[in-house]
Image (tube, grey):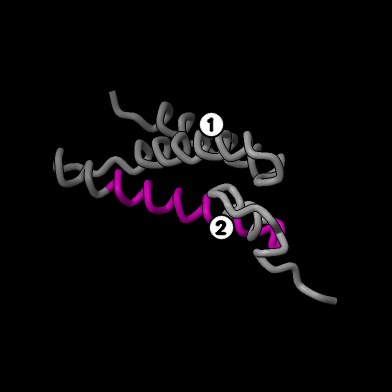
Amino acid sequence: MTWQTFQQFNQTDLTGLFVYPASVWSGFIPLVLFALYIIVLMATFFAGKRLTGREDFFASVAVAGFFTAVIAIIMGLIDGLIDNFTLTTTVVIAIIGVILLFFTKDR
């Protein structure tokens, strides 16, 4: 069995850089989205802690989930980049984050 190289893939634009690894290994895009989720989660958590002096973990979860869901929806516009299960999972995680934020917020 021979492996398909990037030159044989015949898509050298920016979308090819993401579609090629996703076609070789189906876990590439979920891994990218998970890394993006963790980066945004930590960035918003520590920025909120630094600016306000208090920690609001559930707000960070909601923001990171919403941001990752928007990126996943944009990735869904490119044919062959993301599957429906991953797209649905990111949207569900965003909804769960917002629900957690509403039910744990002290008012």
Q: Which residue is mark 1?
A: 95
CA gap between label 2 and label 1 equals: 20 Å
23 vs 44: above or below = below
Q: Residue furthest bottom?
A: 1
Q: Residue furthest top?
A: 107
Identify the element where label 2 is drawn: helix
Q: Is residue 57 left or right of residue 20?
A: left
Q: Quadrant of the C terminus?
A: top left
Looking at the rendering, the stretch of residues picked out in magenta corresponds to 23-45
- Main secondary structure type of the part rendered in magenta: helix
Q: Position of residue 103 (x, y in %)?
A: 43, 28
Q: Residue furthest right?
A: 1
Give the amino acid at mark 2. Answer: Leu
Q: Quadrant of the N terminus?
A: bottom right
Residue at figure coordinates x 42%, y 41% from the top left: 64
Identify the element where label 1 is drawn: helix
**Residue 34 falls within the magenta-colored stretch:** yes
Q: Is residue 50 left or right of residue 105?
A: left
* Nearer to us in this view, 12 or 41: 12
* Nearer to us in this view, 92 or 101: 92
103 vs 23: above or below = above
Q: Which residue is mark 2?
A: 31
Q: Position of residue 3 (x, y in %)?
A: 76, 72
**Residue 1 falls within the magenta-colored stretch:** no
12 vs 49: above or below = below
Q: Is residue 94 left or right of residue 85?
A: left
Mark closer to the chain start, 2 or 1: 2
The residue carrying pointer 1 sits among few (fewer than 14), some (14 to 19) or many (20 or more) residues within 10 Å by Cα, namely some
Q: Position of residue 88 (x, y in %)?
A: 65, 37
Q: Position of residue 32 (x, y in %)?
A: 52, 55
